[in-house]
Amino acid sequence: MTIEVSVVRVFTDDDGEHGNPLGIAPADAVPDDADRQALAKHLGFSETVFVTDPADGTAAVRIFTPATELPFAGHPTVGAAWWLREQGHDIAALDTPAGRVDTRVRHGATWVRARPEWAPEFALHPMLHVDDVVHAHPRDYPSGPNYLWAWEDEFEGRIRSRMFAPDLGITEDEATGAAAVRITAHLRRSLLIRQGHGSHIRTVFGDDGWVEVGGLVRPERTIRV
């Protein structure tokens, strides 16, 4: 059976450049978890998401890296919510193994709302200068996941970041929504994050402990496997 995998880029900049590629596959086409893991490894994206048909404004999603399943991740949920709306579905929430992820659209950006503890435990590495982040090398961080960051403008809440996660089968992630949730909770403020080669991630810190993470999504291609 041929499986159609939609590929989108999540957290692009305002010109639609950069962003983290995401594979999106129908869950009913790959019902077995072992097959889902094998497909995620074959595709090689940092994450591949398997999406059920929505019911009553909610769709269930499962998220796999090339090496393991994640209970929650940011760019797969943002990308899946955007993609479902593009398919004509009125989506209010996604059911992940971690919990219910509410979603909305504002000013063209797709947002999801999550608990920081749903995200993996990232080792946070504050750097003195942006250049320290830019010139870091994944080989110096053999375990993980590691999140390197520095202020671009502390007053405006802008940071520069990179993420290395060899334990998850990801040498370097171009844009990491779950890490954005974690650093937002850690700093207790809303942020504009520039990660990787130039991906843009926005967050909103809530006093209730929830964090919203959002950004722009662009379609890229369809893969048949």
Image: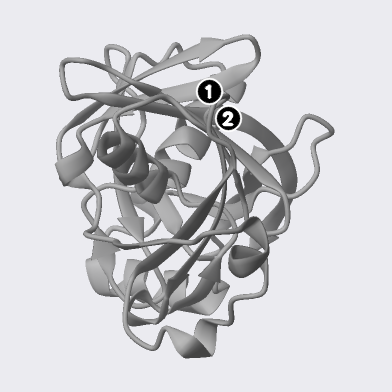
The mark found on residue 215 in the picture is: 2
Q: How is the image coloured?
A: one colour
Residue at the front extreme, as displayed: 128
User: What is the quadrant of residue 55 in the picture?
Assistant: top left
Q: Quadrant of the C terminus?
A: bottom right
Residue 144, horizontal then vertical, whole percent: 32, 76
Q: Residue at x 39, y 88 (%)?
A: 142
Asked whether, in this view, residue 113 is left or right of residue 126, the answer is left
Residue 93, horizontal then vertical, whole percent: 30, 21
Q: Amino acid at mark 2?
A: Gly
Q: Are discs 1 and 2 less than 8 Å apart at CB?
A: yes
Element on which disc 1 rests: strand
User: What is the quadrant of residue 121 in the picture?
Assistant: bottom left
Residue 147, horizontal then vertical, whole percent: 41, 62
The mark found on residue 110 in the picture is: 1
Q: Residue at x 20, y 33 (%)?
A: 115
Element on which disc 2 rests: strand
